[in-house]
Amino acid sequence: MTIRLRPHHFLCMLTFVGEGYSPRFVVNYGRVIDRIRAGERVVLVEGPDDICAPLLGTDDPHCLNDSVRQRDAQALADVVSLTGLRLATGSDLELDAALITRLHAGFAAGTIRQACGGCQWSGLCDQVAGKGFAGTRVKGG
């Protein structure tokens, strides 16, 4: 199988420590992270992805908002700039330890955080990055 992942979740997963919008969301997020850690490939999608799935059954899920699509566009541009990878909707890749390490470094340095502006989780992510990503579920090399 392949994990469907929207671009700004490249950033969110770097600081995922088991907090989220609801218990169901957190459990699902953990399962997606486990699949990534097991080496399952990722395909970039536009719009809701496997992480968003639990929110789609709620009233007015934010994952459909224009602001989230803009967040995706900025995150994708930043990740492409940092990694030099040619990524776009439909791109297929493995989020291996080397790539995660590069993303952690860019996140900690702030070079791939433009998409985080205005995000309600930004403060938590600042704390997690400030502690060297201790307790996160996605690990680099």
Image (cartoon, rainbow, N blue to C red):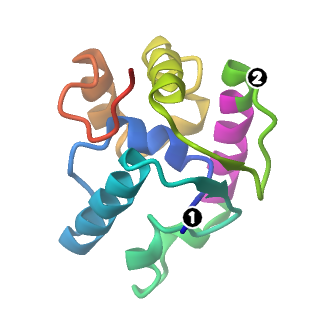
Q: Which mark is residue 84?
A: 2
Quadrant, the N terminus: bottom right
Residue at left 50%, top 23%? 98
Residue 3, how many percent across, how many down? 53, 62
- On the picture, is 28 further left or further right than 36? left
Residue at left 44%, top 64%? 51
- On the picture, is 20 further left or further right than 4? left
Q: Secondary structure at mark 1?
A: loop
Residue at left 28%, top 16%? 130
Q: Which residues are magenta?
A: 68-79
- On the picture, is 115 further left or further right than 105? right
Q: Nearer the viewer, mark 1 or mark 2?
A: 1
- On the picture, is 97 further left or further right than 80? left
Front-lying residue, 96 or 109: 96
| Residue 134 visible, this angle | yes
Classified by dominant secondary structure, the portion drawn in magenta counts as helix
Q: Which mark is residue 46?
A: none
Judging by the rendered image, the residue that carries numbered circle 1 is 2
